[in-house]
């Protein structure tokens, strides 16, 4: 029978980068943004379902969600979606092995696959940042 080890790190073990560095933080942020997008999706279904209650119910619900607090929340959803989408595409390519390279003879100096991921990770984060900026400009200046 296998002995169960106690999780001494708790939530920090789930979020902490440890020896993995930025890939681990991107993984944790990917999970958090995924949960945030899921929460937004559930709330969106609930709000859209208020249309069944008639025009008065819909107008009162939309008045509640028109407050500045919810506008900031919607902007956070834009940020989460931009990061989650671009990082998800990066993860798909990594899982398919497109950026890992072919295995070679382990001779010094060693080549690690994480070293090959860093430039791609930086490019992906720049793309996500550009999408976040474009989304913010569109959200706050174009959509009035």
Image: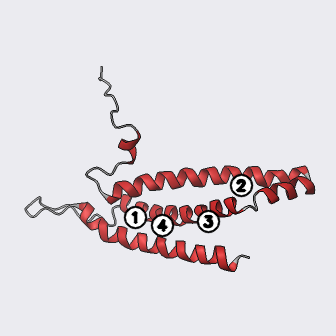
Q: Which residue is mark 2?
A: 44
What residue do we see at 85% from left, 55% from top? 60
State which quadrant residue 4 falls in: top left
Question: In terms of sequence position, does the residue under pointer 3 or pointer 1 come before the other?
Answer: 3
Quadrant containing the N terminus in the rendered view: top left
Q: Which residue is mark 1?
A: 93
Q: Position of residue 21 (x, y in %)?
A: 30, 57
Measure the C-alpha gap from mark 4 to mark 1. 11 Å
User: Which numbered disc, 1 or 2, marks the residue closer to the eye?
Assistant: 2
Quadrant containing the C terminus in the rendered view: bottom right
Question: In terms of sequence position, does the residue under pointer 3 or pointer 2 come before the other?
Answer: 2
Name the element at disc 2: helix
Q: Position of residue 110 (x, y in %)?
A: 13, 61
User: Would you say the residues marked 3 and 1 are in contact, meaning their CB atoms lie under 8 Å apart?
Assistant: no
Question: In terms of sequence position, does the residue under pointer 1 or pointer 2 come before the other?
Answer: 2
Marks counted in the figure total 4
Residue 86, label in figure:
4
Q: Position of residue 74 (x, y in %)?
A: 65, 62
Question: In terms of sequence position, does the residue under pointer 4 or pointer 1 come before the other?
Answer: 4
Measure the C-alpha gap from mark 3 to mark 1. 28 Å
Name the element at disc 1: helix
Position of residue 10 relative to residue 122, above or below, is: above
Q: Which residue is mark 3?
A: 75
Position of residue 14 relative to residue 107, above or below, is: above
């Amino acid at each position: 029978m296998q002995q169960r080890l106690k999780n001494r790190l708790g939530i920090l073990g789930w979020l902490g980068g440890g020896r993995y560095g930025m890939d681990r933080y991107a993984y944790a942020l990917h999970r958090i943004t995924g949960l945030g997008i899921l929460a937004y999706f559930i709330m969106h279904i609930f709000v859209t379902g208020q249309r069944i209650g008639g025009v008065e119910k819909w107008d009162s619900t939309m008045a509640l969600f028109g407050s500045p607090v919810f506008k900031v929340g919607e902007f956070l959803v834009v940020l989460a979606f931009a990061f989650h989408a671009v990082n998800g595409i990066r993860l798909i390519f990594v899982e398919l092995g497109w950026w890992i390279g072919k295995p070679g003879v382990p001779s010094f100096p060693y080549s690690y696959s994480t070293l090959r991921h860093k430039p791609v990770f930086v490019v992906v984060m720049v793309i996500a940042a550009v999408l976040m900026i474009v989304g913010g400009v569109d959200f706050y200046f174009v959509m009035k």
